[in-house]
Image (cartoon, helix red, strand yellow):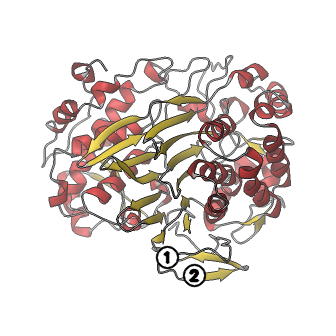
């Protein structure tokens, strides 16, 4: 289910060298990587959720760009090739590691609430009122200006080419279009992109988007200002006013990407650098630091004990994330307490090895305070890294494209809470679980990781990192390993455990006997996201990349 197919294409240039064993199939004159193959290279690498996106980043690396240049190129390109998941009308967060002088920063380009947004009842999931102020263009241009080496027109050229020339629709994209067809056809500009004949595009069809190509050209020429202050801003604001949306010219003009200090922690012998509030990196680190108090490496992978302990740790990470994490511009997040090792030890002590916790409440991190939805990864020859996650929230976001621009709007407003630290306020950024992460060993960055997947981002990132460190898996094996998901909740929800059906049968039976309410999903289920990652092997001078078969992921390197 949701396996990569031959429609997941990569147009590799003839001079590209893949040093891994690499079986291929040819489709429409292009080349598709076989599932389950780790890709090895020595100079630079890109791992993303679409083969053409990975190629876009690689072209920039080969042209002399650094990891930031490649990430920006890939991020603009993925907005074209994965219109269901992200794009110019969306938002994101990225973490950059600069090898010299070993500096890490996070760029927050999360969407924000329009100043006049108000909902007498519930926030709609679709339509113009569902959209928050987009941050993608601000974030990508900001990181390029500060840490890249190339100009915007050069790094945007691959995205423009993909939009103009078109690309083959994968089974994953075709399924997303079909699943959302009834809502898509309500908006003519969106339907014109993915249902041009009045019916959903099918796998194997070619999707061309000349309107989006024209919009990308305007941004390449005019930079962020054309989007937030110029003619694109005018088009967005005009349509919002006509359709009852809240985003105004003033909202767009005032929006800024924010450079933040990443959250940091440790797991075993590794340092962790991840995305800070208002997103999920803190929950990933807290969960791992709870797990550090258990001998995970001595537990058989995906045994009953392994799954149970991880599930219990995840419940506590989620409970604290829900209680304390919000936009740091509006609320004080007790970072030092949540990330402290004594606090993790106290939370670990709550876990019983033979009993499921009832509803897990938030802890008291203040006692431990001292004065203190697509993903892609890039690595360059200097050891610089980027881990990036961006989204439009639900597939096809608000199910609205701005006429004359092909910009598909997010539906992030529903991610605010009715009350508490994540309550809506003008200009506030809503909380989400995205968690692009970089791992360190011996003071050097050795892995860059990320995944989409809504709440499963936190569980997926936790599992992949544990697979790498506790079980010494390779990156592809760590990504492909069976996944499961649990979070805090009351009643029946406290026992809920979503699993991929590949989890060992004996483990499933034992977990059911413990009282877990198991929901079995597909063998490689899109519910659990689509992770990408790159690991550096400094001794061998190699980069090793893995991509997720749950999505149309691909790794390329040279």
Label 1 residue SS? loop
Numbered label tally: 2
Q: Is residue 203 above or below residue 181?
A: below
- Foreground residue among 259 and 234: 259
- Residue 220: x and y in percent read 79, 44
* For marks 2 and 1 on the same chain, the one whose residue lies earlier in the sequence: 1
Q: Is residue 381 above or below residue 390?
A: below
- Residue 458: x and y in percent read 39, 45
Q: Which mark is residue 19?
A: 1
The span from disc 2 to disc 1 (Cα, nearest Å) is: 14 Å
**Residue highlighted by disc 2:** 24
Q: Residues within 10 Å of mark 2 (few under 14, many from 20)?
A: few
- Residue 238: x and y in percent read 85, 28
Q: Is residue 367 toward the left or the right of residue 89 in the image? A: left
- Foreground residue among 528 and 21: 21
Q: Is residue 386 toward the left or the right of residue 236 in the image? A: left
- Residue 505: x and y in percent read 26, 69
| Image quadrant where one finds the C terminus | bottom right
- Foreground residue among 264 and 42: 42
At horizontal 46% and vertical 74% (from top left) the residue drawn is: 37
């Amino acid at each position: 289910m949701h396996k990569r197919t031959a429609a997941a294409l990569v147009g590799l240039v003839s001079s590209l060298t893949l040093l891994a064993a690499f079986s291929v199939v040819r489709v429409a004159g292009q080349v598709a990587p076989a599932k389950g193959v780790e890709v090895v290279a020595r100079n630079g690498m890109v791992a993303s959720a679409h083969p053409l996106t990975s190629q876009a980043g690689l072209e920039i690396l080969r042209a002399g760009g650094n990891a930031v240049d490649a990430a920006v190129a890939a991020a603009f390109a993925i907005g074209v090739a994965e219109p269901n998941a992200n794009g110019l009308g969306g938002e994101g967060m990225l973490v950059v590691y600069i090898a010299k002088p070993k500096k890490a920063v996070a760029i927050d380009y999360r969407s924000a609430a329009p100043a006049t947004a108000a909902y007498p009842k519930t926030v709609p999931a679709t339509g113009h009122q569902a959209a928050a102020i987009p941050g993608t263009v601000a974030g990508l241009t900001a990181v390029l200006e500060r840490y890249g080496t190339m100009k915007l027109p050069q790094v945007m050229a691959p995205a423009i080419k993909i939009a103009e020339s078109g690309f083959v629709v994968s089974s994953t994209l075709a399924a997303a279009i079909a699943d959302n067809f009834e809502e898509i056809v309500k908006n003519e500009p969106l339907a014109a992109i993915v249902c041009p004949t009045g019916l959903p595009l099918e796998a194997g069809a070619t999707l061309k988007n000349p309107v989006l190509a024209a919009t990308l050209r305007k941004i390449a020429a005019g930079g962020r200002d054309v989007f937030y202050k110029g003619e694109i801003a005018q088009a967005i604001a005009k349509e919002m006013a006509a359709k009852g949306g809240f985003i105004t010219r003033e909202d767009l003009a005032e929006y800024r990407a924010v450079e933040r200090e990443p959250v940091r922690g440790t797991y075993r012998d590794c340092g962790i650098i991840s995305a800070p509030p208002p997103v999920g990196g803190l929950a990933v680190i807290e969960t791992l630091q709870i797990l550090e108090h258990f001998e995970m490496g001595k537990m058989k992978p995906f045994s009953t004990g392994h799954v149970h302990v991880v599930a219990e740790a995840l419940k506590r990470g989620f409970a604290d994330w829900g209680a304390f994490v919000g936009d740091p511009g509006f609320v004080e997040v007790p970072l030092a307490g949540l990330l402290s090792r004594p606090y993790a030890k106290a939370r670990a002590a709550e876990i019983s090895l033979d009993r499921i916790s009832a509803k897990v409440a938030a802890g008291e991190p203040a006692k431990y305070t001292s004065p203190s939805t697509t993903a892609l990864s890039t690595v360059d020859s200097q050891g610089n890294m980027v881990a990036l996650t961006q989204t439009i929230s639900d597939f096809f976001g608000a199910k609205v494209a701005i006429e004359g621009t092909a910009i598909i709007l997010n539906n992030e407003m529903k991610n605010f809470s009715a009350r508490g630290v994540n309550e809506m306020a003008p200009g506030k950024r809503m909380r989400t679980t995205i968690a692009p992460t970089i791992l360190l060993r011996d003071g050097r960055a050795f892995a860059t990781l990320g995944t989409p997947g809504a709440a499963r981002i936190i569980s997926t990132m936790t599992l992949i990192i544990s697979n790498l460190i506790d079980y010494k898996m390779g990156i592809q094996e760590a990504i492909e390993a069976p996944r499961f998901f649990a979070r805090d909740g009351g009643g029946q929800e406290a026992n809920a455990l979503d699993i991929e059906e590949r989890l060992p049968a004996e483990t499933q039976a034992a977990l059911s006997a413990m009282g877990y309410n198991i929901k079995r999903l597909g063998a490689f289920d899109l519910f659990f996201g689509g992770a990408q990652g790159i690991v550096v092997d400094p001794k061998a001078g190699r980069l090793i990349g893995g991509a997720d078969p749950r999505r149309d992921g691909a790794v390329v390197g040279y």
